[in-house]
Amino acid sequence: GNSVTQMEGPVTLSEEAFLTINCTYTATGYPSLFWYVQYPGEGLQLLLKATKADDKGSNKGFEATYRKETTSFHLEKGSVQVSDSAVYFCALSTNAGKSTFGDGTTLTVKP
Amino acid sequence: GAGVSQSPRYKVAKRGQDVALRCDPISGHVSLFWYQQALGQGPEFLTYFQNEAQLDKSGLPSDRFFAERPEGSVSTLKIQRTQQEDSAVYLCASSSGTGDSPLHFGNGTRLTVT
């Protein structure tokens, strides 16, 4: 079956530091890949997505590239802010629409 | 409405009671999903509707769990004879289409079974 493995947290960084959160997946077929973010007290919301190999998704300074050869979709940001503190979830979705999620990585950014 | 709405926000049930959780998706979204999220884990798939048809219920953990979406809009997740292991956050999400359409989540219902 499909599965997503993401870097365990929590991750604590200073403001303006570089962020990487690793995500690898196992899937049959050609899934779409997503990063969702959950800010404190809010529901999960889409951060970015990529639908085919070598696509790069980007939003709010975050980027992730769909790497089919390494089955990875690592999330990166060059300079994090305190407001980026949240839980980040990597996910994949097949044509059936059902999504499989990783266990989430908690990011805390300190001023 | 502007987003996916779930109610109640919190529910405390005594073991053995039945509960019903409601989800009002984004207007026009044909796909609706229910997920269960335990503390410190990612959402786990429960069931999926396309309009009023329940196309996949493979994630429902037992026959005590039942979901419906009779008119292709609002959905209800019902749990009969609740058990302590049912305690979790139940998330509803809707989307406009198929695999590459992102999910729009509600804020969830936190169920605590005592």
Image (cartoon, coloured by chain):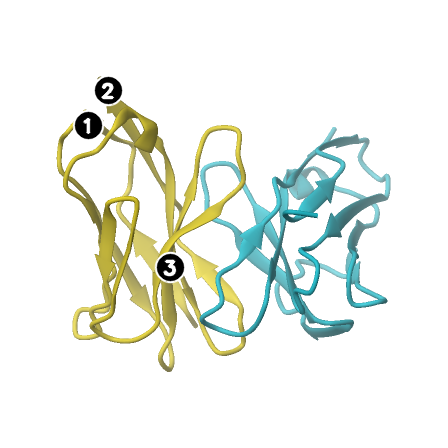
Read off the residue under disc 1. Answer: A13
Q: Which chain is yellow?
A: A
Cα separation between marks 2 and 3: 26 Å
* Residue B30 x, y percent position in the rendering: 67, 69
Q: In the rendered structure, the residue with mark 2 lies on which chain?
A: A
| Lower position in the chain sequence, tag 3 or tag 1 | 1
The structure residue drawn at horizontal position 19% and vertical position 27%, both measured from the top left corner, is: A13
Q: Is residue B87 above or below residue B31?
A: above
Cα separation between marks 1 and 2: 6 Å
Label 3 CA crowd tier, 10 Å (few <14, some 14–19, many 20+): many
Q: Evaluate if marks 2 and 3 touch, with contact meaning CB atoms under 8 Å apart.
A: no
Q: Evaluate if marks 1 and 2 touch, with contact meaning CB atoms under 8 Å apart.
A: yes
Q: Is residue B31 above or below residue B65?
A: below
Q: In the rendered structure, the residue with mark 1 lies on which chain?
A: A
| Lower position in the chain sequence, tag 2 or tag 3 | 3
Task: Say which amino acid is labelled 2.
Answer: Lys
Q: Quadrant of the N terminus of chain A?
A: bottom left
Q: Which mark is residue A43?
A: none
Q: Is B107 placed left or right of A72 in the picture? A: right
Q: Which mark is residue A110?
A: 2
Q: Which chain is cyan?
A: B
* Residue A81 x, y percent position in the rendering: 25, 29
Q: Quadrant of the C terminus of chain A?
A: top left
The structure residue drawn at horizontal position 57% and vertical position 72%, both measured from the top left corner, is: B97
Q: Is A27 placed left or right of B26 in the picture? A: left
Label 1 CA crowd tier, 10 Å (few <14, some 14–19, many 20+): some
| Residue closest to the far top | A111
Q: Is A95 placed left or right of A14 in the picture? A: right
Q: Are marks 3 and 1 on the same chain?
A: yes
